[in-house]
Amino acid sequence: MKINIHEDRCMLSLLSKDVIDILKVRNIIRNEQERIDFCGMVIRREEIDVFIPRNSSINKNNNTKSICSLLMRAIHKFSLRRERFSLSDGDTEHITGESLLNLAFRILTDYISHGIYSKRVYEIKKNPSKTDWNRTIKKSKIYPSFESYIYLDTYGKRKKIFYNDPITLIHVSIIREIYHSYGWIFFNFDSNTESNLSEFENPVSDIKIKLMILENELRHVYSDRETKLIKDMMDYLSEVNGHPGQDCVIGVNKFQTVWEHMIDACLEYKFDINNKLAKPCYKINGLYEVAKNKGGRTDTVLKDETGKKLAIVDAKYYGATNPNELPGWPDIIKQFFYAMALKDIYQNSIIYNYFVFPGGLKNIESIHLQDPITKVLKDESYEPIRCIFIEPFSLMKAYNSDSKLKDLSNTLLHI
């Protein structure tokens, strides 16, 4: 399968018409757009177009599948852990194909743990190698023998497993489909997996009939695992039925939200300061009323073990290659204000201020306020905002493995 790599915020003119049309149908591209705003993948026939985070550092020697897998596993993990919240412009992130990605992961995980769904039938067997004494006592005649009793016939049960049942064939067909399209994202399958699955017959092709068969089976199963698996298969088929054809889109717009979430998850020494920050207070009819939902909220604050050093960390998903690709006046003023607010609370502590950008160029060092007339920097009054850069895939690797960026955390606190 051919994999085409694109970067988030690239010009739409660099994309094929097929990909643009697919993304327009999913409302990821709108008519007035000139650049893509999306990280994820578009699966079409035998090609996959992957949109990686901006400023990612990859080269021809990188394994494209492993890179794509890192990205999609990060998006999947984010979809399970995130809290929905609005960005500064009022928009929110939207994950396209979220339910399909989660279903694929659960169905594949079940397959790895339990194998193919099989129909089990228990039949009563006379004089088996293993005796079911409760059944034998109920069914067999008893004969006295000296001071004891004997049973001339004993009974037991034998389990028969059928792999040509309609449910089994549906399960196999779903596994084959998911394995081909998404399996490489989550797991390194054995090379024999696909050949083993090819030995099974194909089920009925009509999705509605498959759903009827699964719904009927659901009424006759009792174990939690089987119930959950059948429900997941039904949900998967319903999802696929809603998007006919081979084209599939999975990913997230507004990657800023994912960027913020991952950085917050991977830093050490985190400290919740939001409940201590001053809140707006309104004087109404002579009475002062605090605005409960309008207090300041910093992104991430770090504090060292001594409490003498604090760092305000604001994750920014900007290009950050020139002044036109840097945070604007509202973001800068907000960051300066947070530093002043923390200094008001921790007067004897050193407050560090940071923007964290994707990439490895590191050509933007810091942001200052400058007097427009004298050109003198106002660093004594406004702590400069230092600029830190993190390579996106290094961050995703740490995030996917639940690791902490200890060196970065120490750097931010000057430890």
Image (cartoon, rainbow, N blue to C red):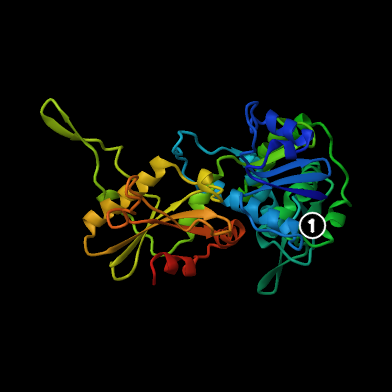
**Quarter of image, res 334:** top left
Residue most extreme to the left: 286
Position of 35 with respect to 83 (left or right) is right
Front-most of 152 and 128? 128
- Residue 280 visible somewhere in the drawing: yes
Image quadrant holding the C terminus, namely bottom left
User: Who's the residue at 52% across and 43% down the image?
Assistant: 324
Label 1, residues with CA under 10 Å away: few <14, some 14-19, many ≥20: some
Front-most of 33 and 285? 33
Residue holding disc 1: 125
- Whole-percent x, y for residue 245 in the image: 79, 33
- Whole-percent x, y for residue 81 in the image: 51, 49
Q: Is residue 400 above or below residue 17?
A: below
Mark 1 residue element:
strand
User: Who's the residue at 55% across and 40% down the image?
Assistant: 254
Position of 198 with respect to 294 (left or right) is right
